[in-house]
Amino acid sequence: MKVSSQADGAPQNGRRNFLGKALGLTAAAIGTAAAAGVDAAGIKQPGDDAFGDTPEALTPAGTDFELAHDRSVYAYTAKDGNLAKEGFEGKRWGMLIDLRKCIGCQACTAACKFENNIPTGVFRTWVPDVELGTYPDTKRAFLPRLCNHCERPSCIEVCPAGATWQRKDGIVEIDYDLCWGCGACVNACPYDARFINPITKTADKCTFCSQRVDQGLLPACVETCVGGARQFGDLNDPNDPMTKQVLSEAIQQLKPGTGNEPRVFYIGLTTELQNNPPGIPTLWSKEQQDMDRNDHDWDIATGKEADHV
């Protein structure tokens, strides 16, 4: 028995209707996404409210640093007990770097740059590649450098603006709103860990990625270390894996004679590097000139003879 032509076309018409409705829903979703400032994948695009009216998202790395490092950084502390300002009660964060495992790959340097949006030419952490000894008895060494978050930071007491402080858990922070870039802390740091940020014109340095630590994450340099040379933990917790290693192995600190009591420890630090670590040499007056401060307030009068009393 022959089925009617309407019955013959029913399955085909059903598929067409389904596809038509699906395409219609997709087009509607794309239109809604466009109106909301997102693409088809749900990713916000430059020009919407999240990016502002100016194309900061398209600027070179570091040039939008100022937008993300003002007092608004601490806005979320209203709901977490002022954690970003005061830190964790009873903890003492520290870092252990095993130089036997460091391969000098600079993954930590790159990760720090991306995580903290550090401008070109300055670094919060870096890994100098040095040659020790005299030819032909030479060897290659790597020495990861960063702020030591000292127990007795010399940078805090010299700050005339009160812009640098130490949290309860030992992390040394900088208030970018209070800092006016005088550079007193840059000169006071014995580890060459501080610099003047060319974008914000304020002091800058490693913060142990406190924005990550406060959320239960590791600092970016620790998480990305290819050789597993960096460990981060609570020095007040004897059961912390890092603390156990600090207590059980022979460890070293940079420039122990300064009295700063750094809380970045090393394994395998050579005598040649302990008290003469390779830094990033910068002439302070030159740094000021790079920031377009050419009033010579920081120049040293080298042509004058000594005055005798």
Image (cartoon, rainbow, N blue to C red):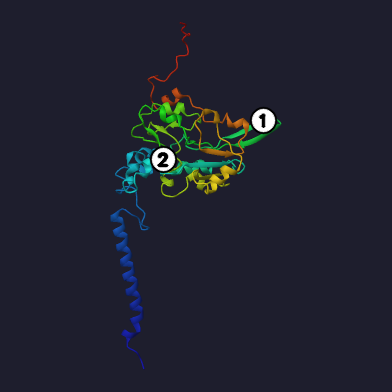
Quadrant of the rendered structure where residue 163 is?
A: top left
In the rendered structure, which disc, 1 or 2, sits on the residue that comes first in sequence?
Answer: 1
Residue identifier under label 2: 168
Q: Nearer the viewer, residue 220 or 20?
A: 220
Residue 133 numbered mark, or none: 1
Q: Residues within 10 Å of mark 1 (few under 14, many from 20)?
A: few
Residue 82 percent across, percent down from the top left: 34, 44
Q: Which residue type does callout 2 highlight?
A: Lys
Q: Which residue type does callout 1 highlight?
A: Gly
Residue drawn 36% across the image and 57% down it: 42
Residue drawn 44% across the image and 26% down it: 287
Residue drawn 47% across the image and 13% down it: 302
Mark 1 vs mark 2: give the one in front: 2
Residue 269 percent across, percent down from the top left: 60, 36
Q: Residues within 10 Å of mark 2 (few under 14, many from 20)?
A: some
Residue 163 numbered mark, or none: none
Q: Is residue 96 visible?
A: yes
